Amino acid sequence: MFEALLLPIVILFLVVTTLMSAVKQVPQGHKWTLERFGRYRATLEPGLNIIVPFIDRIGRKVNMMEQVLDIDRQEIITKDNAMVAVDGVVFFTVMDAAKASYEVASLQSAVVNLTMTNIRTVMGSMDLDELLSQRDQINARLLAVVDHATDPWGVKVTRIEIKDIEPPKDLVNAMARQMKAEREKRAQILDASGDREAEILRAEGMKQAAILEAEGRKEAAFRDAEARERSAQAEAEATRMVSEAISSGSVQAVNYFVATRYTQALEKMASSSNAKVVYMPLEASSVIGAVGGIASLAKEAMKDMPGGGASSGDSGPWGSKS
């Protein structure tokens, strides 16, 4: 009885095993290569796939997602014989699973070594200053070269980034001193430029002040000359009037002229800070008489005015009735 049931159980087990080996489930983001008798036959896409049991087998399981590889630090001699240490990263994606499986033995190792070799080639043809200032151009050149070289492997290199460029310490110190000297030079240039601008502005201000002062002196001199001219005209007019009065035979006009000059001289003597005692001359009575003559002259002038004179017998502001 048991022996009769054993054979169907074995047959069922073989059938289930065969069916399970014929069905393959490929995960998302991967592709598997299918080999028949050791030769590449097809590529299995993500999902369920049916193969021929015992004839077909899975060859390589390829990751189709973007992958990142670190580039180890290496020393590079630049064009100007400077030793620098460089490292980086490379991003790539497998586009053809069959080529990535059968065109190169070790894909990741090949990409890393190819990238390191091209880093030495590209950066070794540049000066140190170019390495430090043109990193984007270095990345672009590396990407173009490496992507073209990996195309037969069914790989697409998407990015190559240089992470760090480390020059020697003595070179870094020299660059720091050079940068400090350049900054000090720019600071001195700015200070000198500021001083020059300040001196120019100061000179312009002094020039404008001198021009305004000269114009003020010119205006004052013009005003003084005009005042002296008017004073001279008034003096000439007074002298002319006195001369006409003298020529007409009026002695009182002479007395007026002499008394005016005399009183002006006395005024100057009295206003002097050094004048303490004033000695009147012997002819002071004559001066007083001249002042009286001035009063008489004014009295006669009031009489000559139309409608403004009083009779000789009337008392007025210049004298009493006799």
Image: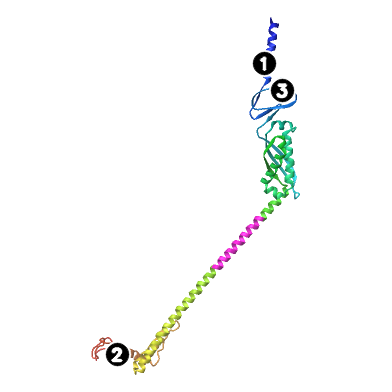
Snapshot quadrant of residue 46: top right
286 on left or right of 274:
left
182 on left or right of 303:
right
Mark 2: which amino acid? Glu
Question: How are the colours assigned in the image?
Answer: rainbow
Q: Nearer the viewer, residue 74 or 302?
A: 74
Mark 1: which amino acid? Val
Mark 3: which amino acid? Asp
92 on left or right of 283:
right
Q: 10 Å neighbourhood of mark 3: few (<14), some, or many (≥20)? A: some
Position of residue 293 measured from the top left corner of the image (x, y, whole percent): 33, 91
According to the picture, the residue beneath numbered tag 1 turns out to be: 16
Snapshot quadrant of residue 61: top right
According to the picture, the residue beneath numbered tag 2 turns out to be: 300
Residue at the limit of the structure toward the top, as seen here: 1
Q: Is residue 266 visible?
A: no
In whole angstroms, how far apart are the C-alphas of marks 2 and 1? 165 Å
In whole angstroms, how far apart are the C-alphas of marks 2 and 3? 160 Å
Q: 10 Å neighbourhood of mark 1: few (<14), some, or many (≥20)? A: few
Q: Tell me the tag on residue 290.
A: none
